[in-house]
Every structure is written in structure tokens, then in C-alpha cells.
């Protein structure tokens, strides 16, 4: 296990490093990014007066909307000649958000990811199978550069073509598999159907992230692949994967790369900073980025932060697993619920498999939520290959009951035949909102 020096900085030592880097970042954005100059002038903030980390609470937030308004290069703090890479995330509405990196940014990012891979069990000289998508998405190249920096033999397979993935796993004998939990589940199921037993493959560790997933999903992936799976978090606006990572020893929260970012949790409504342990929206401020440093970037991701000691020896703050995105929160008859909470309940039901989608529709003025989930093969056969059979109906009612008593929500459950819910090759699409479609009909 390699632990980087900065990962063990405690209290004052980390604060001093952050303060020094914060001051430089503020001066840089004020001088070079007109958006920040105008914003900070509007707030009457003098960046030269920044003297304590807590001064950050006086600063305004940056949002995805700000990035969209400044599309494509308006948020950059360096000239285009200094950019060596651009990534973008596909916008669900309108323009994508664009992020840029200087050579130094790529080095820092690669180091952060190398650290993350080492935290999850990666070792120099071993093989890493990278099933994150390559391209404008930061997952593929982010893990790739980190893996190479750590000295691992990197297989840049990207997402898709699952049969070939399995062939390569058999032939190249990787110790680590990286991918979204939903796509890795696809690979695992395919291996299972080909009769490749978990103890008959070379895999030891998994580095999974880019979408919310639950402890139950972790257990399923670990059993099916015979691995230990750790959670990796990040977002392109802030850097990409590697902003935070779970350690293989503790697996209880993700260590935040605090030498690169200041992490805060705020109430998404009042925007007040919350205490450690309180759940709210994650906000990140860059400390080392050259091309596109962001001040108090609102991620839309719900989590909490803790600072208690971790058994691995790292002293950096840890964030909880992401519960969900604010945009993905469902309000079912007044009750707030995230898809990950539904997933947790669902996976406690042995008759179904972890493939599901949540459909939102309207009936009159009410939202109607229907959960589609697949029966497992064995139960499906017992139900005489019919999802209308009494067994399937009983399973659906059982899940409805479970959701009602655990989450206090009434949603309709429809059990489907195996292999009928679309499989993901990257991030799974869990929520299908049909309300807007219907308003045109
Ligand atoms: O998903 C970066 C990444 C790549 C992270 C590979 C981990 C592994 P974006 O495409 O910009 O970047 O999407 C960022 O994905 O705001 C979260 O909502 C979600 N997300 C990322 N990691 C996790 C995770 C990459 N471990 C958005 N758990 C973020 C839950 C995650 N959600």
C-alpha cells in the first residue's frame, strides 16, 4: 500500500497548504477569468484579503449554468495555446459543459488518479482492465493516465463489446477492473453465463464509480467477480475521476484529495454551509488547477463529510457514498426519494436482479411512478416463463410493500422477464421521465 505524503497531512498542515494554494487560485481567476472578476466585483470581494479558509463562506457559488453561459472557453484562466486537452460532458439540456487542462493539470490529475488506484488495491507491474468509456467523458482517459503513472499495464478496452472484454480478461489476466457498476455488472453476468467462476479469473479489485450505486450492488459485484470493489468519485467540471476514492482497507467513505480541492457540504436550498456529518450538496473549490479553476462549484451531488480517523492511516476528510443527484430526486406524493434508496430495497429481494428503471408519468395532476425490474432466471422459470404468473405478481407486491414500509412511498412495481431492461455500456439510465413527452400528446 502506497500512501502519498499529502494524504497524511493532519489539521494545520493541510490547512496551511490549502490556504496558500487558495490565495493563488483566487488571484489567478480574478485576473484571468472575466466571469469571476465581474462576479467578485459584484459581491464587493477583494481576493487579496483572503486570509482564513473560512473566508470562503463569503464567496459566491459557481454553477453548471455559469459554465453553460460561458461555453465553450469563457471559464478558462489560460490562453488556448496552453491547453493540451479538452473534455466535455453531454448536457441533458442544450450545450455541453467544456473543461480544459494544461500539461500541468494533466500531471496533477494523473497523480490523483494514480493515488486513487493504489488506494483501491492497484500495484505497479500488474494489469488494469479499463472499461470506462474513452472520449470526451473523463472516465476512460482519466483512469488510463493514472494507471500508467502508477506503473500498471493498462488495457484501454473502453466500454462495450462485452464478449471481447471477457476474452481480454481471460487472456491478459488483469488484477483490476475499472468501469461503471452497471456496466461491470453486465460483464459479470456475461462471465457467469459463460460458466467462468469467480475464483477462475485473475481479477482481485474493482474501481467503480461515475454513477450512484449501493452497498448491495457492491456485494453482488464482489460475489460475481470474486473481487473487492471500491468506489471512485469525480466530475469533469472539477477534474474527472479521482476527486475522492475509497481505500481498500477501510471501505467506509471516500478520501477526498484535499491537497487539490476544498470540499464543503451546503444546504441545497439555503446554501448555508453544513456541519461535518450533515447531508447536503457537495461543493468543491480547485486549489491546483491551471486551465479551469472553479470557486465553490455546486456539484448537485448529495453526500456528507466526516473527519474521523481511517484505519488505512490517511488523514484526509472522507465523503459518504453519493446518495444521488438533486436533479434525480423523485417526489412521490410529497416524499423525497433517490433512485439509490429504491435500489437498496430492491436488491434486498432475492427474486429479482439488479436491472431496473424508474418511469415517471402523470395521471391527472398526480405524478405516477412505476418501477420496472427483472425477475431472476430461476424464478422466471418457476413462474412458467410468464411474468403474469402468480409468482411474478407476488414478487411485485412484495417489493411494493418493502418500498412502502422502508421509504413510505407508494409506487407500482412491474416485474419483467429476464434481459428485457436495456443494459448500459457506461452510465445506466435509471430514470425515464415521460411527463414532458406526454404534455405534447
Ligand atoms: O463521471 C467522472 C468519473 C469517471 C468518476 C469515472 C468516477 C469514475 P461526469 O461525467 O462529469 O464525470 O459525471 C459526474 O457523475 O456529479 C455524480 O453525479 C456522478 N458520479 C461520479 N462518480 C460517482 C460515484 C464522471 N462514485 C457526475 N458515485 C457526478 C455516485 C458518481 N455518483
Image (cartoon, rainbow, N blue to C red):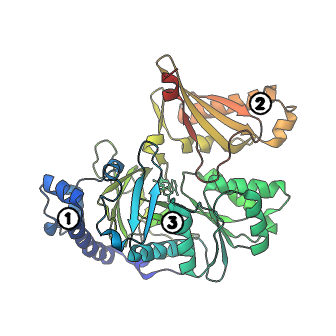
In this figure, which residue is indicated by the disc labeled 1? 30
Whether pointer 1 and pointer 3 mark residues with C-beta atoms closer than 8 Å, the reply is no
Q: Nearer the viewer, mark 1 or mark 3?
A: 1
Residue 280 seen in the current view: yes
**Classed neighbour count for the residue bearing mark 3: other residues with Cα under 10 Å, few (<14), some (14–19), many (≥20):** many
In this figure, which residue is indicated by the disc labeled 3? 245
Extreme front residue here?
81
Horizontal side of 194 relative to 374 (left or right) equals: right
The dot on residue 141 is none
User: Which of the 4 image quadrants contains residue 176?
Assistant: bottom right
Q: Secondary structure at mark 3?
A: strand
Q: Secondary structure at mark 2?
A: helix
Residue 36 place in picture, x, y as percent = 22, 58
Residue 114 place in picture, x, y as percent = 52, 75
Q: Is residue 310 above or below residue 359?
A: below
Residue under the point 23% across and 69% down = 28
Horizontal side of 7 relative to 127 (left or right) equals: left
Q: Can you say which quadrant of the picture contains the N terminus?
A: bottom right
Q: Earlier in the sequence, mark 3 or mark 2?
A: 3
Give how far apart the Cα atoms at labels 1 and 3 are: 31 Å
User: Which of the 4 image quadrants contains residue 17?
Assistant: bottom left
Residue 317 place in picture, x, y as percent = 41, 66
Nearer-the-camera pick, 6 or 372: 372
The dot on residue 392 is 2
Residue under the point 53% across and 74% down = 146
Residue 151 place in picture, x, y as percent = 59, 82
Amino acid at each position: 500500500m502506497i500512501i502519498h505524503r499529502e494524504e497524511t497531512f493532519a489539521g494545520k498542515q493541510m490547512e496551511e497548504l490549502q490556504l496558500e494554494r487558495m490565495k493563488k487560485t483566487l488571484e489567478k481567476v480574478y485576473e484571468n477569468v472575466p466571469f469571476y472578476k465581474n462576479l467578485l466585483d459584484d459581491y464587493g470581494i477583494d481576493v487579496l484579503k483572503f486570509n482564513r479558509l473560512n473566508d470562503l463562506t463569503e464567496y459566491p457559488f459557481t454553477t453548471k449554468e455559469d459554465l453553460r453561459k460561458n461555453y465553450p472557453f469563457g471559464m478558462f484562466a489560460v490562453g488556448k495555446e496552453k491547453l493540451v486537452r479538452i473534455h466535455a460532458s453531454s448536457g441533458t439540456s442544450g450545450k455541453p459543459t467544456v473543461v480544459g487542462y494544461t500539461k500541468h493539470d494533466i500531471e496533477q490529475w494523473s497523480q490523483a488518479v494514480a493515488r486513487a488506484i493504489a488506494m483501491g488495491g492497484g500495484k505497479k507491474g500488474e494489469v488494469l482492465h479499463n472499461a470506462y468509456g474513452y472520449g470526451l467523458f473523463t472516465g476512460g482517459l482519466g483512469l488510463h493516465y493514472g494507471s500508467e503513472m502508477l506503473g500498471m499495464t493498462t488495457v484501454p478496452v473502453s466500454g462495450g463489446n462485452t464478449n471481447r472484454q471477457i476474452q481480454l480478461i481471460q487472456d491478459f489476466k488483469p488484477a483490476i477492473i475499472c468501469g461503471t457498476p452497471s456496466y461491470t455488472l453486465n460483464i459479470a453476468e456475461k462471465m457467469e453465463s459463460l460458466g467462468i467462476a469467480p475464483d477462475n479469473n485473475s481479477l482481485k479489485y474493482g474501481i467503480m464509480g461515475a454513477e450512484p450505486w449501493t452497498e448491495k450492488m457492491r456485494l453482488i459485484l464482489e460475489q460475481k467477480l470474486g473481487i473487492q470493489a471500491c468506489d471512485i468519485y469525480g466530475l469533469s467540471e472539477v477534474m474527472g475521476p479521482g476527486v475522492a476514492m475509497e481505500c481498500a482497507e477501510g471501505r467506509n467513505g471516500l478520501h477526498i484529495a484535499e491537497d487539490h480541492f476544498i470540499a464543503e457540504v451546503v444546504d441545497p436550498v439555503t446554501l448555508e454551509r453544513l456541519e461535518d456529518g450533515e447531508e447536503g450538496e457537495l461543493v468543491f473549490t480547485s486549489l491546483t488547477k491551471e486551465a479551469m479553476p472553479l470557486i465553490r462549484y455546486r456539484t448537485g451531488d448529495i453526500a456528507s463529510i466526516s473527519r474521523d480517523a481511517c484505519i488505512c492511516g490517511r488523514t484526509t476528510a472522507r465523503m459518504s457514498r453519493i446518495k444521488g443527484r438533486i436533479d434525480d430526486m423523485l417526489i412521490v406524493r410529497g416524499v423525497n426519494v433517490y433512485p439509490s434508496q429504491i435500489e437498496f430495497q430492491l436488491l434486498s429481494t432475492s427474486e429479482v436482479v439488479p436491472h431496473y428503471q424508474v418511469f415517471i408519468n402523470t395521471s391527472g395532476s398526480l405524478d405516477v411512478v412505476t418501477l420496472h425490474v427483472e425477475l431472476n432466471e430461476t424464478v422466471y422459470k418457476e413462474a412458467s416463463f410468464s411474468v403474469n404468473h402468480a409468482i411474478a405478481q407476488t414478487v411485485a407486491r412484495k417489493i411494493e410493500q418493502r418500498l412502502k414500509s422502508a421509504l413510505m412511498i407508494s409506487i407500482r412495481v412491474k416485474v419483467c422477464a429476464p434481459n428485457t431492461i436495456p443494459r448500459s455500456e457506461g452510465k445506466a439510465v435509471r430514470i425515464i421521465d415521460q411527463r414532458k413527452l406526454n404534455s405534447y400528446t
